[in-house]
Image (cartoon, rainbow, N blue to C red):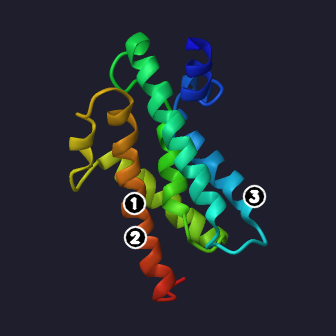
Amino acid sequence: MKRLALLLSSCLGIGYVKGGGTLVSILTCAVWYYAGRGHDAVTLMPALLTALILVVGIWSAGEMEVKWGKDSYRVVIDEVAGMCLSLLFIPVKWPYILIGLILFRFFDMIKPLYIRRLEDLRGGWGVMMDDMLAGLYANLILQALVFLKLW
């Protein structure tokens, strides 16, 4: 089980690469685009997959915290979940995906608006929830851009 937690939390080893959080966010955007082309942005499947990634992330990040310490850079499944949340219910178009990536990485790295406080949660919850709030903020801004047809 520890090996599975290691593979999942590091996204098959991407967490070991310098800049792994940004890299896995970019890869998530690419997968999101290619998987979502031709589909309506308001489907339930992406939301269910995001929820599954969150649950798996809470478990695997919590398991790896014992080995790697609190919120290790090697754990990047949190970036996958946050990036997915950023893009939920947004039209699958490159401009929105690129803006979502920029917004998510901004909120994830700067951690304004109570995001940093969520890191204090115990275990995998603290690892995952700060990225989920960053993703929520990015999504709300993207929703406004779509609604206002600014892009």
Q: Residue furthest bottom?
A: 148
Q: Is residue 66 above or below residue 87?
A: above
Tell me the residue at 40%/39% (across/down): 128
Which of pointers 3 and 2 lies earlier in the amino acid sequence?
Answer: 3
Label 1, residues with CA under 10 Å away: few <14, some 14-19, many ≥20: many
Residue at mark 2: 140
- Total labels: the figure holds 3
Q: Is residue 75 left or right of residue 48?
A: left
> Marks 3 and 2, Cα distance to the nearest angstrom?
22 Å
Q: Amino acid at mark 2?
A: Leu
The quadrant in which residue 118 appears is top left
Q: Position of residue 49 (x, y in %)?
A: 61, 50
SS state under label 3: helix
Residue in the picture at 64% in, 69% down: 43
* Kind of element beneath mark 1: helix
In the foreground, 103 or 144: 144
- Quadrant where the C terminus sits is bottom right
Q: Quadrant of the N terminus?
A: top right
First reached walking from the N terminus: tag 3 or tag 1 = 3
* Circle 2 crowding by C-alpha within 10 Å: few under 14, some 14–19, many from 20: some
Look at the numbered discs 1 and 2 and tell me whether their residues touch, using CB distance below 8 Å. Answer: yes
* Residue occupied by mark 3: 35
**Picture residue at 63% right of the left edge, 54% below the top:** 29
Q: Is residue 119 above or below residue 88?
A: above
Distance of mark 3 from mark 1, alpha carbons?
21 Å
For the residues marked 1 and 2, what is the alpha-carbon distance in whole angstroms?
6 Å
Proximity of marks 3 and 1: CB atoms separated by less than 8 Å? no
Q: Which residue is mark 1?
A: 136
Q: For this view, does 107 lie left or right of residue 27? A: left
